[in-house]
Image: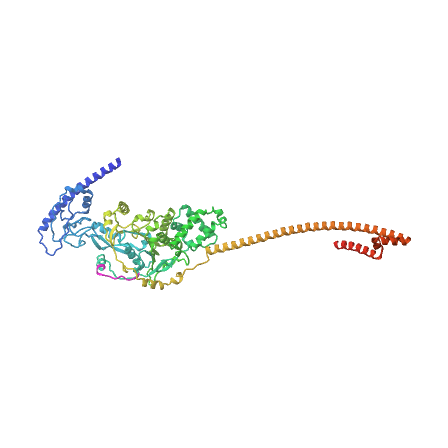
Amino acid sequence: MSDAVEQARAAAEAARVAAEEARRLADEAAARAEELAAALAQTPLVPDAEPAVAASPAPSGQEAPLAPVAEPAVADVAAAGPADATAPGPAAASTTGTEPPGGVEAPSGVEATGGADPTNGVEATGGADPTNGVSGPLGDAAIAAIRDGYAVEGSALELGALVNGDARPDVQVRIPLGMLNRHGLVAGATGTGKTRTLQVLAEQIAANGVPVFAADIKGDLSGLAVAGQGNEKLLARTAGIGQDWTPAASEAELYSLGGQGTGVPIRATVSGFGPLLLSKVLGLNDTQESSLGLVFHYAERAGLPLVDLADLRSVLTFLVSDEGKPELAELGGLSKQTAGVILRELITFADKGADAFFGEPEIDTQVFLRTAPDGRGIVSLLEVPGVQDQPEVFSTFLMWLLADLFNELPEVGDQDKPKLVFFFDEAHLLFSGASKDFTEQIVRTVRLIRSKGVGIFFVTQTPKDVPNDVLAQLGSRIQHQLRAHTPDDAKALRATVSTYPTSDYDLGEVLTSLATGEAIVTVMNEKGAPTPVAWTRLRAPQGSMDPMPSAAMEARVASSPLLATYGTRVDPDSAHEMLARRMEAAAAQSAAAEAQEAAATAAADAEKEAARAAAAAAKEAAAQAKQEERERAAAQKEYERTQREFEKAERAAQSRRSRTTSTRRTTSSRKADDPLSDLLGGGLGGTIAKEVVQGIFSTLRRRR
């Protein structure tokens, strides 16, 4: 709280001192005005003379005297504010148009009683031309310093004429051609003329034999390939700044991102794009960015070309599969969750149309370094339709072009003119949401690509859109009008003013009052030192400020020698196809292994079944053998029993026969009485007994 009070007291004391000084200067101005009025009263009136410019009314409400007041007094009065209410203010005297004596300059930003001049803030009486004979905030010494500061011995780009109340065609503002690789910034609010400034720069750079690359965001830069058409207003403006305007068309080549739009398609491979830029586009965090870098490392090591997004998705899917997990085991592995996030972002990215940007043939950035047969540089215009729908894609793709140029071009050091000038329009899209690593890469590229002979101009709305580390590398600044309608705008304005070298301008006021086509300029001179700050009315383009007709654009693209090389997309054998074959081979190998395993299992089962069958057969054979053995034993037993009975019967028969012989009669009667004995004893009985014995033994033989 005490600090705030002390600051307020210090500010009040400074205001009091400024007010006293203002009163003193106002008193002196009043006295001089009275002397001038007396002198003018003795001068004869000239009927046709223009009305003189009135001086600023004093804060007390009285009109200020006619005599011009030096700028320091005006600045002090403005700083003093209400404390100047006591300053004297005699009524303004009329004049015949005679120039005031002494060469005293009129104040800048002081109101009078007529229509306002948008270029210097001074109003004139009676509807007179506000720029006719009105002096600005700079004195003769400051004007001479600007004239000397922008004098160039070698080739240069003519930006325009100094504005000091009126345009000063004798004081031209230039950029040395050799300083373009020190990079630059074109900034300003919407509608202040940034695109026309870009066109003026591109036309002159190309006319000096230097190729140009620029993104045609709104589609109206294509008009530089068509000669412009003059009109009375244009010629009057160009004559007022010393520009000898003639219509001229630049040699231009039209490109489009992946064929989306009218132009030769520009494509890049995913591997050429790199994990860092891709992570920025996808909005990945540090962990996911590191994992994506690991995937790129594996793909390069494994010989898997990443041409389009399908290749990258295939590699990610493979590395989290059972077959691919061992591939990254020694590198730390890839979690399925991280891979899932990256895959989802890739799908969203592809749905926005990014699939068209990635593929082959990849553009050779050397085509942007071409010159026309007549020695002029070719202006390469990239048409970017619908950039608001995919700003990250657009800005990051342009950053890829710069990075590729940086990698491909050799070191050349400082030269009389650059190899290429690259205009980065809508630069705020590049840095929005950029990670620390990404910003560091941009800063490194901007810092080092100068030695490759490439100059970069960032085109954006306010300097705060560009990181400080990048701004520190920019040697040229063309600042169009800034608006301060909000506290944030006012803060940005103060920050912008603080970055300019010391000058005689009240930059806070000038930057908010610049007219369309005017800018505050400071560049590097041929010695590499900053030039004085110059309020500049910029030149008009020599090409058309309207877009090229669509029919003419299509005809130009159809006749381009690059269309045969880059016009048709090709689908080479890359990671997607290679991994598909590998997975198919793995699937076939797995199927073969499964079939072999199934065959081995079947063979084992068959062997087991055969063993079981053999065992069963052996068991059955053993049982059958046992059964046959039992049957043989039974048959043998039956045979032996029958044999015994037979032998017994035979003995009995023999005994009977013996008895029969001795006693035939007795036996005969017994035979009659015993039919069985008769039967066995007779011839028929012997035959039957023999057949019975043979039958028994035949059965035994068959069973054996």
- Residue 468 in picture, x, y percent from top left: 32, 47
Q: Residue furthest right?
A: 662
| 659 or 34: nearer the viewer | 659
- Residue 88 in picture, x, y percent from top left: 13, 43
Classify residue 327 as left or right of residue 132. Answer: right
Colouring style: rainbow
> Quadrant location of the N terminus?
top left
Q: Which is the main secondary structure of the residues drawn in magenta? A: loop
| 311 or 593: nearer the viewer | 593
Is 227 one of the magenta-colored residues? Answer: yes
Classify residue 105 as left or right of residue 43. Answer: right
How many marks overall? Answer: 0
Q: Is residue 621 visible?
A: yes
Classify residue 437 as left or right of residue 682. Answer: left
Classify residue 192 as left or right of residue 437. Answer: left
- Residue 440 in picture, x, y percent from top left: 37, 48
Q: Which stretch did the figure color magenta?
A: 225-234
Q: Quarter-wise, where is residue 384 in the image? A: bottom left
Is 680 one of the magenta-colored residues? Answer: no
- Residue 606 in picture, x, y percent from top left: 62, 52
Q: Is residue 418 visible?
A: no
